[in-house]
Image (cartoon, helix red, strand yellow):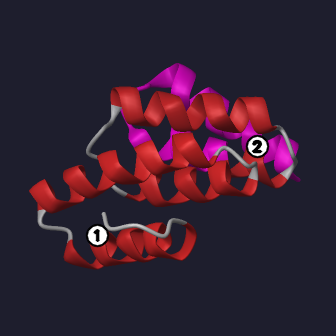
Amino acid sequence: MSQNKIQYLEDLIAEDGRDAFPYFALAKEYEKIGEKEKASFNYKKLISTFPSYSGTYYHYAQFLITNEKTDLAKDIITTGLEVLKSQKENHLYNELSGLYLQFFEEDI
């Protein structure tokens, strides 16, 4: 099933790569099947191409923490908090700051 979704999402991106959601969904699909490098590639693509796609920061940080890349996760969270604050995305800001506080014992 995931392979069908992956192919569909890759086709969407090839057809029109201007939408952030297929990259996000593709990262999540690769994450589900344990394709860490491909998941990471798509998260990085999202942040570099669509930095205002706010949900990316939380999910990418969780992915990095799960894969024991906490230094990078901390950087992603910090960047995400700046983006979310500028967008006045208070709910997402609170979720991301909660993730930070859960894993890092210092002030943001």
Res. 69 image quadrant: top right
Residue at the image point whose x is 73% and y is 49% from the top: 68
Quarter where residue 100 is shown: bottom left
Q: Which residue is mark 2?
A: 30
Q: Which kind of residue does numbered mark 2 sit on?
A: Tyr
- Residue 14 in percent (x, y) is at 55, 20
In the rendered image, residue 15 lying in the magenta stretch gets the answer yes
Vertical position of residue 35 compared to residue 102: above or below: above
Residue 35 percent location from the top left of the image: 83, 38
Q: Give the residues drawn in magenta, as a range.
A: 1-27
Position of the C terminus, as image quadrant, is bottom left
Instruction: Please tell me whether the stretch drawn in magenta is mainly helix, strand or loop.
Output: helix
* Quarter of the view holding residue 95: bottom left
- Residue 53 seen in the figure: no
Which label belongs to residue 57? Answer: none
Of helix, strand and loop, which one carries label 2? helix
Kind of residue at disc 1: Tyr
Left-right relation of 49 to 26: left
**Residue position for label 1:** 93
Residue 60, percent from left and from top = 55, 50
Rate crowding at label 2 as few (under 14), some (14 to 19) or many (20 or more) other CA atoms within 10 Å. many
Return the x and y of residue 103 as percentages of the image width and height. 56, 68
